[in-house]
Image: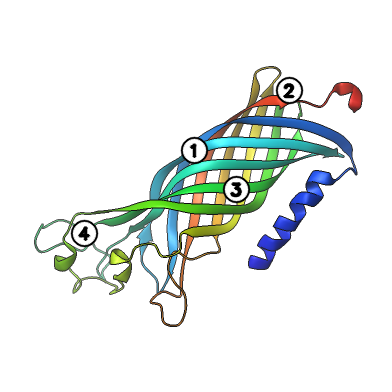
């Protein structure tokens, strides 16, 4: 997976300078917003539900070429994202674990806030200036840790370990160790363009983290602790520069 990330990074200057098809020189900027469902792949395993949080920020797109029916662009974002994990605390009979003090089912979640920067190849098929096209986004994503917070309805010293199906609880008291995150993002979506009004994009995207939030050496508790995110977002772009028709 790390080799694939390096390969994708190598592709961007090639894509930006490619002149095999019809030249394009269109630059658009805009805003995006959406909802992210996330979890963390822990080894040893921690049972989880999906953690929900908002994401949004600025979007940039440079259209560089149309090759046959494929419209090729470089697409990037600078986003604020609230992601993390939510534990699924169950007994061996798959029933909620009840805390002896509160009498409530134990709940625990961690929210970690990042600045995320995906830089992706954007390949589209369909209408270029007016109407609908369908697109694929693929490329690396980088994240910079901002802060984190915990939500739970029990005291850590009085949690019900005896009834839990798993005894893995070290993550509950561990702060994020690695402040830089990186991985690969893949998105599929549709775009509707209106001349002089702009471009409206709806996208479903998956992010697979290649970095771990905790140390992963033989001396560390977790062998892996990487993110997996699914998000749906809306984006609005307006054109700053466009390719003149007589240049086609």
Residue 84 sits above or below residue 33 on the image:
below
Label pair 3/4, CB-CB below 8 angstroms: no
- Mark 2 or mark 4: name the one nearer the start of the chain: 4
Dividing the picture into quadrants, the one containing residue 157 is bottom left
According to the picture, the residue beneath numbered tag 4 turns out to be 106
Whole-angstrom CA distance, mark 2 to mark 4, is 52 Å
Tell me which numbered mark, 2 or 3, is placed earlier along the sequence.
3
Q: Residue pushed farthest bottom? A: 218
Callout 1 touching callout 2 (CB < 8 Å): no
Q: Residue at x 76, y 36 (%)?
A: 63
Q: At numbered mark 4, what does the secondary structure look like: helix, strand or loop?
A: loop
Left or right, 166 with respect to 144, comes to left
Residue matched to label 2? 130
Upstream in sequence: badge 1 or badge 4: 1
Closer to us: 152 or 64: 64
Figure check: 64 above or below 112: above
Callout 3: 10 Å neighbours few (<14), some, many (20+)? many
Q: Position of residue 27 (x, y in %)?
A: 72, 31
The 10 Å Cα crowd at callout 1, few under 14, some 14 to 19, many 20 or more, is: many
- Side (left or right) of 240 relative to 77: right
* Quarter of the image where the N terminus is located: bottom right
Residue 80: x, y in percent?
Answer: 47, 42
Front label number (1 vs 4):
1
For the C terminus, the image quarter is: top right
Pointer 2: residues within 10 angstroms few (<14), some, or many (20+)?
A: some
Q: List x then y, in percent, for residue 100.
A: 10, 64
Judge the density around disc 4: few (<14), some (14-19), many (≥20) Cα neighbours within 10 Å: many
Q: Earlier in the sequence, mark 1 or mark 2?
A: 1
């Amino acid at each position: 997976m790390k080799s694939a990330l390096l390969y994708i990074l190598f592709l961007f200057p090639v894509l930006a300078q490619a002149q095999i098809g019809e030249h394009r020189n269109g630059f658009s900027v805009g805003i995006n917003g959406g909802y992210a469902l996330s979890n963390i792949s822990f080894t040893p395993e921690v049972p989880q539900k999906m953690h929900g949080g908002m994401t949004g920020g600025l979007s940039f797109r440079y259209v560089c070429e149309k090759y046959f029916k494929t419209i090729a662009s470089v697409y990037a974002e600078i986003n604020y994202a609230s992601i993390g994990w939510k534990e699924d605390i169950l007994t061996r009979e798959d029933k909620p674990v009840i805390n002896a003090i509160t009498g409530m089912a134990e709940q625990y979640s961690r929210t970690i806030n990042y600045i995320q920067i995906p830089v992706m190849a954007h390949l589209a098929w369909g209408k270029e200036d007016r109407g609908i096209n369908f697109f694929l986004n693929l490329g690396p994503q980088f994240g910079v840790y901002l802060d984190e917070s915990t939500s739970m309805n029990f005291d850590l010293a009085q949690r019900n370990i005896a009834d839990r199906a798993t005894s893995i609880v070290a993550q509950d008291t561990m702060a994020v160790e690695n402040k830089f995150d990186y991985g690969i993002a893949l998105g599929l979506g549709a775009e509707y363009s209106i001349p002089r009004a702009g471009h409206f994009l709806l996208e479903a995207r998956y992010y697979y983290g290649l970095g771990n939030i905790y140390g992963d050496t033989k001396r560390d508790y977790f062998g892996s602790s990487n993110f997996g995110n699914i998000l749906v977002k809306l984006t609005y772009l307006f054109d700053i520069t466009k390719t003149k028709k007589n240049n086609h």
